[in-house]
Amino acid sequence: MFGWKGKMLRVDLSRRNCSVEETPSDLIRDYMGGRGAGVKILFDEIDPRIDPLGPENKLIFATGPLVGTGVPAGGRYIVVSKSPLSGAIANPCCGGYFGPNLKFAGYDLLIIEGKSPEPVYLFIRNDVVEIRSADQLWGKWATETERLLRAEMSEDFDEWELNNMSIVTIGPAGENLVKFACIMSDGGRAAGRSGLGAVMGSKNLKGLAVSGTGEVKIADVDGFKKAVMDFFEEGRANETLEKRRRWGTWSLPGRANKTGTQAALNFQSGYFEPFTKFEDPDFIRDSIRVRDEACFGCPFACSKRSRIEDLAYPGTTKGPEHESMALLGSNCGIGDLDDIYRANYLCNELGMDTISAGAIISCAMELFEKGYLPEKDIGYPLSFGSNESMFQLMRKTALREDFGDLLAEGGDALAQKYGHPELFMGIKGMGMPAWHPQGIEVIGLQYATNNVGGCHTKATLPFYEGRKDPKHHVRLTKQDQDYIAVVDSSVLCWIIYHGPLWGEKLLSWLQITTGIDYTENDLSLIGERIWNLERIFNLKAGISKKDDRLPKRITDEPRVKNQVVHLDRMLPEYYKFRGWDENGIPTPEKLQQLGLEKEGAGL
């Protein structure tokens, strides 16, 4: 078998049992791997109505056929589960080295089920799989957990293997079931959205340590080598990718702010004056960057490790990326780069999604400023720009202390508690990302129809498409959503393959690596099948047309360029174009076309 390893590892924490299964050929054929395979397994093995923090929920770490092959930007993995934040399907993606290490250990997927009675971590070294005690790690921050795990295993590994081992952890937020807790790996990378750190915490699973010494077979080795060299040449000549190499996402805050599409003050604006200094991304690079870091097999090294001179925030961390800078910065009224760094550092170490944290805290700030949230409930003032209050609130949220216990439940719970649900800028319970939809209308449709909720990584973010015919937005949204579903199933990096290199590169890599003569139509069908299966999961979980919405601020209040997002015009066209009925339910004809009749039964 080329590309895939042909095996899945299943770990039952309740029974402390580990078993190896064959990766089903029909799973590969119909869903490829990664996100698609994970969604299909989850759909088949759990009731979508279960409590996401109960032992019945499963956590699936999934790789795809291109992971670990040496395909540039092919070093990622997907985590699939039911989200405790939204109740919807969850499939955050993460870079680094964990995905390749899982493949090198011999597995396409890792399925974790049940619940351990005490804290544990999972150790995987090729065919050696052990469930080990994590009592000594419980309560530790993410970086300290990783350091302690490496120290614990230092006697069993030589220096090279120890350094190349991948470690996935949760912080205190995951342990305390904060509903937007994330999964951290490889020194600061995050599978950030949807709260799957809380799912790990609910299973008493503190972390995973994975080391593999195998390889991934490639069908056309000579063709592969040539394609890699050609890619490097094209990449060096590509201006967009060169900008990614130099600045990562640091070129975006100033760009978004300049065009009026930057989330600011809980989306009350698309512009934040203190961010004008970021129009020169070298300001950020020269201020906090320590070094560039790359995911496995990637020549672009768009990840930036950073540091500030503050003994209260020792060491270094990843980022902050643009989304983090926006949600923790401009959206909370914070314009100082060091303060944005501090907020990002705390989220990484405590194990909280930066986007959700910023969306929830900015909601609290607006509630406070408008007099709906009394200071006595918080314990201190919480106006926009209150940096120290924000830092304190982050710690309390991760530990579920005082007012932080309410914030740990998510933005919907906070806004409803104080009688103003319209002030949480969320979709399906998940806070919106950095790009203000009123500045780029098609993004509003992408956000509203996203199966996971308010997330920016499930379509291609056509930054400056402007305001065109609704049918154009509909076509672009469906095309992009289906395409990214395939990118996430291969598993390639969305940042690199979402624009400059587009789909022809993905098709070529799959053909050369697997030896399967994929066509563009094959990939389109796989992507559409994945998107529709996620929709079916959500429908059976109770998420429906009523949840395909945007905050009223976006649809009713012209805050950016005197514009609103006309979702009411686009949504019916979107449903029709997808082959769904007026309620957003896939029609029998669409289910038959995609081979989803069984999955869609009872809708």
Image (cartoon, grey):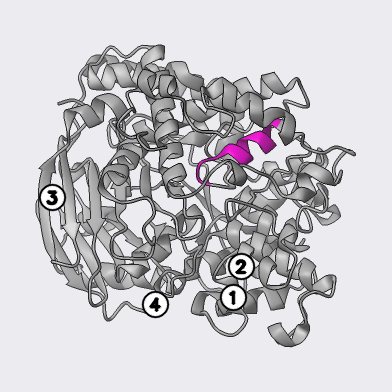
Looking at the picture, tell me which residue is in the foreground, 164 or 470: 470
> Nearer the N terminus, badge 1 or badge 2?
1
Is-magenta flag for residue 58? no
- Residue at screen point 30% across, 65% down: 207
Q: Residue 357 appears in which quarter of the rendering?
A: bottom right
Looking at the picture, tell me which residue is in the foreground, 565 or 2: 565
Which stretch appears magenta?
442-452
The amino acid type of the residue labelled 3 equals Asn
Asked whether the residues under the numbered discs 1 and 4 touch, taking CB atoms below 8 Å apart as contact, a structural biologist would say no
Q: Is residue 267 above or below residue 114?
A: above
212 relative position to 252: left or right: left
Q: Secondary structure at mark 2?
A: helix
Looking at the picture, tell me which residue is in the foreground, 380 or 143: 380
Residue 150: image tag: none
Residue with the mark numbered 3:
126
Q: Position of residue 91 (x, y in %)?
A: 42, 46
Asked whether the residues under the numbered discs 2 and 3 touch, taking CB atoms below 8 Å apart as contact, a structural biologist would say no
Q: Position of residue 8 (x, y in %)?
A: 17, 44
Q: Is residue 264 above or below residue 228?
A: below
- As measured in the structure, the alpha-carbon distance from the residue carrying label 4 to the one carrying label 3 is 27 Å
Residue 140: image tag: 4
Q: Secondary structure at mark 4?
A: loop
Q: Secondary structure at mark 1?
A: helix
- Residue at screen point 64% across, 48% down: 433
- Select label 1 or label 4 by which is in front: 1
- As measured in the structure, the alpha-carbon distance from the residue carrying label 2 to the one carrying label 3 is 43 Å
Residue 413: image tag: 2
Q: Is residue 379 above or below residue 238?
A: below
The amino acid type of the residue labelled 1 equals Leu
Q: Secondary structure at mark 3?
A: loop
> Nearer the N terminus, badge 3 or badge 1?
3
